[in-house]
Image (tube, rainbow, N blue to C red):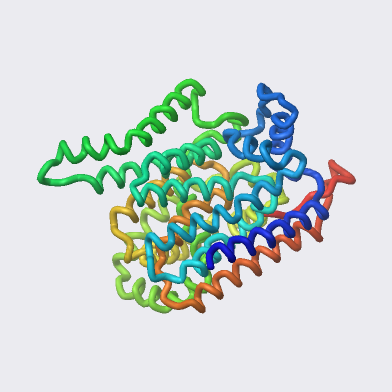
Amino acid sequence: MEYAVAALLTVCHGFAVRFAYEKVPEPYMDEIFHVNQTRAYCSGDFFFWNEKITTPPALYYLAMTFFCGVERYTNTLLVPVAFLVVHRLRLQLFPKSFAVADTLAILSVPVLLHSSLLFYTDLLSLAAVLAGVSFGIDQRYLLSSLFFGFSVLTRQTNIVWAFMFGVHSLLGGYRRSHPIGSLLGTAARLWSLVLLGIGFAFFVFTNKGIVLGDRSAHEPKLHLVQVLYASVFVAFSSAPHFLSHFPGLLRHLLSHPFRQLLFLIPIFLAIHFTTMDHPYLLADNRHIAFYVWQRFFRRHELLKYVYAPVYLCCVTYALKSVRTVPRLVVLLATIASCVVLVPAHLLEPRYFIIPYAVWRLGVKTAHLWTIVLETFFNVVVALTVLYLFYFRPFEWHNEPGVQQRFMW
């Protein structure tokens, strides 16, 4: 059944990309840099590099092979891959789950759905990371490392997921009866992951940092509230599941008021000391995040503190929803999410896609109707934003005649 669904999704995505080309034929926003780089490769110029590009060129090499001139269809090729990878991983974690429905729910998250219709790296990045995890669970470490390596060649921060998986595998192979020997034996089996780590360290050393281009706009910051924003993203992207658990969640929070007050302290501190504006967030009114920031954060200096209970509720929901997952896995996934998100200065919903997918894979859903509603909700939200993107363009006064479009 999963192959039939994957094929159907591929056909639907192909038609959706065709429609995207009809409505927005020219590269838009970040596509301008990605397409420019890919077409340089298509013409045989492998020494050209667009200085605005911050991530490695795996997507461009893939598009160069099959889709020169129609680069958005690269993601159409990736749709069945992503579906089968997520489905495989879901069955590995929960063999008796509604795997097909859960996979559709994960891949229908609006931010991913939108970016997959453009020439963006998100779908490739997600598929490669989760494939690395899936084959690693089967202890096919060489294949796992190849996928993790490909994910790093798509987006550098994916090394964090590879590292955390390596740590989990290492600790999983630990035996009290033979502590040193068991660790060394497991490390030897993970040699390909170790080589990946060494190679990445060499890249950072020679590159003098993790970012390839546009470094001034991507300097690392201590942005702790990113994790809190991500928790809201998780709750919103799984809204039917969140709402079905909200009464019990509220009872849990109110039954331990003193404990919740203690938990609110670090949340208030994170809000007070690490809430920050990125120049892109303040200046670019083509993004949904711009309007969220203007209307819910900048109206008053104290308004940001009002959301502390919301963050507490969303964080608690996220953690309670994965209570059937081993604590070590939850801890390592949480650490990985923090390491990926906290240094990011810009509030960018696309950064939340992999942390969300990893979390959602760990959620054991008891009712099919909840998953169906979740997918339906995500598709409705995605279509609403796509409607604005396609049919409600606008112009900037300083660029008359150039259509700007709303997107995530």
Name the residue: 42% across, 44% down.
Answer: 161
Answer with the quarter of the image where residue 64 lies: top right
Give the percent coordinates (x, y) of residue 343: 47, 40
Give the percent coordinates (x, y) of residue 185: 22, 37
Specify whether residue 188 is in view.
Answer: yes
Specify the farthest residue to the right: 401
Answer with the quarter of the image where residue 38 lies: top right
Give the percent coordinates (x, y) of residue 133: 41, 49
Name the residue: 50% across, 46% down.
Answer: 128
| Left or right of 171 on screen, residue 200 | right
Q: Quadrant of the C terminus?
A: bottom right
Compare residues 246 and 389 and report the one nearer the observer.
389
Give the percent coordinates (x, y) of residue 130: 46, 50
| Left or right of 168 on screen, residue 234 | right
Q: Count of labels shown?
A: 0
Name the residue: 60% across, 42% down.
Answer: 278
| Left or right of 208 on screen, residue 110 | right
Compare residues 63 and 329 and report the one nearer the observer.
63
Name the residue: 53% across, 36% down.
Answer: 153
Answer with the quarter of the image where residue 197 lies: top left
Specify whether residue 222 is in view.
Answer: no
